[in-house]
Image: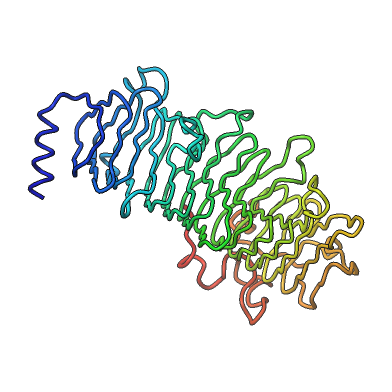
């Protein structure tokens, strides 16, 4: 502690501008102005006090090879921004963790005017990016940035908690703006909000076998073109999330956008989620085998698609197992299966213990679809329906036919009648 206090005293007495590699434990506070990129060297820790503002010049990177502890508070967040902030010009770069030491933390941090594309050839284009590093990010917000938000790559471990993951200043044509792009890493997304996104930009795009992925209690607020949570060649769990307004509006992409999608032999567990007003609630393609249980679909065009339009025929194949779900207000089909072509393998769906708007949309008699004997087609009696609402409050009213109507006597849908309020968080 004496060493850190001494370094802090020296920094506070020094001129505000700095440009160096930090090689010993260091404390920043007040208003820190960089003249170029800053590196926290292996073995060193940079601590940043609550309420500190860090200004960086155009294209500058804060590179962390040691450890960063930037821990603000709700009343005194830490701000990373360009020189002059709102009155300045250009954009600084990113915070880049590269084979960093220990666990770094970003708490109540605000990133303004960042550019994730700076030195993107070294790995990725997130305004916060990692390579073989361990980071915990809580209560984060980014404004007026370009690039993806979080790129978690190369055997990193990341916990993202209560983060607002916006779209920034990206445009639909830029190809940038994904919220979380994970590759070969362990990732937890907890109680995060993913804003509306434009262009070919998933809110959360995670890939890589053999890693732990847990997405829970998050809000995914939609896109006219791309997906909410997309698994490619990886497993994991998506639970207690809300997916709304994944619309698939652009010509040629109408059947290619979903709240939760999966490809390349993924087998995630998808449970206790709410899908509202989506073109496809869930898309299972590329020989994926998801387990879908206790989800509620409201006013979706298609609830579950066991293929994706526009993909090559070998990749149009999905094998979802569906239990204990409510599919209500469906405007087209509850289940959608692609047209088999040539010798391509066939999609299959195993569905039972569900309440569906119409049994006529289940492809009954289709050899690709196994429909169990416990299918309801009865108004689930959502709470919101009591006052003529739109059904978006999907808690079950007393007397709902979905109470204890599921496999092993569980309630159907995302909100168990007896325990939903106590157990289910909505942020």
In the displayed structure, 325 sits above or below 39; it is below
The part of the image, by quadrant, that contains residue 59 is top left
Q: Position of residue 81 (x, y in %)?
A: 35, 29
Q: Position of residue 40 (x, y in %)?
A: 28, 40
Give 343 or 221, whichever is nearer the viewer: 343
Q: Left or right: where does residue 403 sit relative to residue 162?
A: right
Q: Residue at x 50, y 36 (%)?
A: 125
Q: Colour scheme of this structure image?
A: rainbow
Q: How many marks?
A: 0
Q: Residue at x 55, y 62 (%)?
A: 239
The part of the image, by quadrant, that contains residue 90 is top left
Q: Position of residue 380 (x, y in %)?
A: 68, 65
Q: Residue at x 76, y 77 (%)?
A: 374
Q: Left or right: where does residue 86 sit relative to residue 330?
A: left
Q: Left or right: where does residue 410 sit relative to residue 69?
A: right
Q: Left or right: where does residue 283 sit relative to residue 37?
A: right
Give 154 or 388, whichever is nearer the viewer: 154
Q: Position of residue 390 (x, y in %)?
A: 65, 51
């Amino acid at each position: 502690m004496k060493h850190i206090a001494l370094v802090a005293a020296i920094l506070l007495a020094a001129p505000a501008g700095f440009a160096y590699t930090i090689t010993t434990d260091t404390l920043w506070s007040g208003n820190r102005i960089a003249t170029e990129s800053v590196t926290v060297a292996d073995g060193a820790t940079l601590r940043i006090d609550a309420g500190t503002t860090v200004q960086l010049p155009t294209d500058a990177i804060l590179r962390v090879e040691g450890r960063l502890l930037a821990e603000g508070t709700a009343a005194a967040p830490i701000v990373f921004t360009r020189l002059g902030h709102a009155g300045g010009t250009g954009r600084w770069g990113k915070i880049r963790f590269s084979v960093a030491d220990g666990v770094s933390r970003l708490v109540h941090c605000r990133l303004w005017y960042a550019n994730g594309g700076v030195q993107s050839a070294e790995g990725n284009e997130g305004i916060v990016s990692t390579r073989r590093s361990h980071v915990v990010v809580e209560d984060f917000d980014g404004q007026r940035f370009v690039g993806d938000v979080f790129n978690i790559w190369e055997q990193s471990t990341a916990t993202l908690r209560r983060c607002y993951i916006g779209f920034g200043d990206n445009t639909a044509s830029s190809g940038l703006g994904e919220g979380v792009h994970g590759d070969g890493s362990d990732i937890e997304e907890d109680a995060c909000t993913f804003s509306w996104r434009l262009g070919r930009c998933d809110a959360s795009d995670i890939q890589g076998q053999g890693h732990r992925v847990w997405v829970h209690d998050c809000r995914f607020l939609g896109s006219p073109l791309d997906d909410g949570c997309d698994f490619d060649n990886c497993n994991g769990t998506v639970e207690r999330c809300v997916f709304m307004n994944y619309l698939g509006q652009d010509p040629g992409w109408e059947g290619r956008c979903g709240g939760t999608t999966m490809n390349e032999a993924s087998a995630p567990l998808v449970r206790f989620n709410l899908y509202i007003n989506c073109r496809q609630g869930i898309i299972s393609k590329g020989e994926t085998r998801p387990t879908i249980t206790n989800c509620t679909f409201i006013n979706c065009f298609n609830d579950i698609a066991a293929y994706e339009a526009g993909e090559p025929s070998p990749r149009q194949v999905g094998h979802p197992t569906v239990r204990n779900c409510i599919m209500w207000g469906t405007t087209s089909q509850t289940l959608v299966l692609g047209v088999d072509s040539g010798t391509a393998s066939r999609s299959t769906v195993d569905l039972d213990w569900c309440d569906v708007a119409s049994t006529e949309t289940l492809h009954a008699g289709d050899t690709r679809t196994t429909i169990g004997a416990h299918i309801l087609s009865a108004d689930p009696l959502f709470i919101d329906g009591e006052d003529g609402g739109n059904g978006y409050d999907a808690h079950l009213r007393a007397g709902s036919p979905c109470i204890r109507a599921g496999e092993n006597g569980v309630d159907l849908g995302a909100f168990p009648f007896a325990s939903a309020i106590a157990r289910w968080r909505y942020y």
